[in-house]
Image (tube, rainbow, N blue to C red):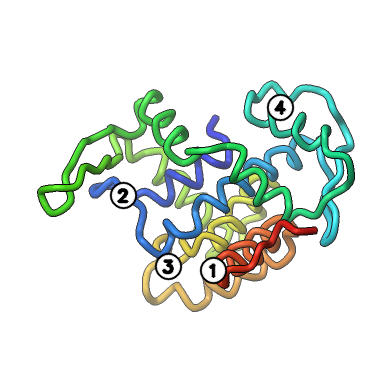
Amino acid sequence: MLDLLEELLLLAVDEEKGTIPLGVSGRIDFCLSGALLIELELRNRIKVDKKTLKIIDRSSTGHSRCDTLLDLIDRSKRVRSPGYWITTTKKAFKHLRRKYLEGLVDQGILREEERQILWVFPSTAYPLRDTLLKRELRDRIRLVILREEIPNPRTTRLIALVHACGLTNTLFDKDERKMARKKVKALAKEDQLVQAIMKTIQASNSGAYAGSL
């Protein structure tokens, strides 16, 4: 079973080009950091509201990065905001995107290709080797949004992250997008961590520091 970060990256990567669209690429690292925190929340290790993120269970999750992050939060001298921990996670887990992409390569889901941009600059692409998982992910989201199937908590959080990353249009046909955007946005609005991710992205784009609280 893929975790939220793997699912989000799989949805973001272009199947043939093996790259992440420019508009999404500027958001994805904040979303991946937030997704790691959401993993802790789904595993009932933290509790989040608009202003605070608190540990409620210090026991191991069995997920190495989640446990490392849980320990980092536990060592904080005071309770911090969700925005603070999104920013801190992004700094603490360097190259998170690349490491997760390489992990998907190791699982045989993506393949790694070395390329050159303008025949000069080296670049790595990650086209899909196995398209089945991505198709299943898209179908799972589309069933919730278009057919109002009741989602489990993990799918709900994934849909909210799709909104935060700006991926909605890539998952729906042109005639579906207006309605899909409305429903995806509504789900994201109820998610405190995703709202914090979006505020952190906005603050980063404006040059402000979102993790000051």
Callout 2 amino acid: Thr
Separation of marks 1 and 3 at Cα, in angstroms: 22 Å
Callout 4 amino acid: Asp
- Determine which quarter of the picture holds residue 213: bottom right
Left or right of residue 166, residue 41 in this image: right
Q: Which residue is mark 3?
A: 169
* Disc 3 element: helix
Instruction: Say whether disc 4 or disc 3 marks the residue closer to the N-terminus.
Output: 4
On screen, 195 above or below 155?
Answer: below
Instruction: Say whether disc 1 or disc 4 marks the residue closer to the N-terminus.
Output: 4
Separation of marks 1 and 4 at Cα, in angstroms: 30 Å
Separation of marks 2 and 4 at Cα, in angstroms: 29 Å
Q: Which residue is mark 2?
A: 19
Instruction: Say whether disc 2 or disc 1 marks the residue closer to the N-terminus.
Output: 2
Q: Which residue is mark 4?
A: 67
| Residue 47, x across and y down, in percent | 84, 46
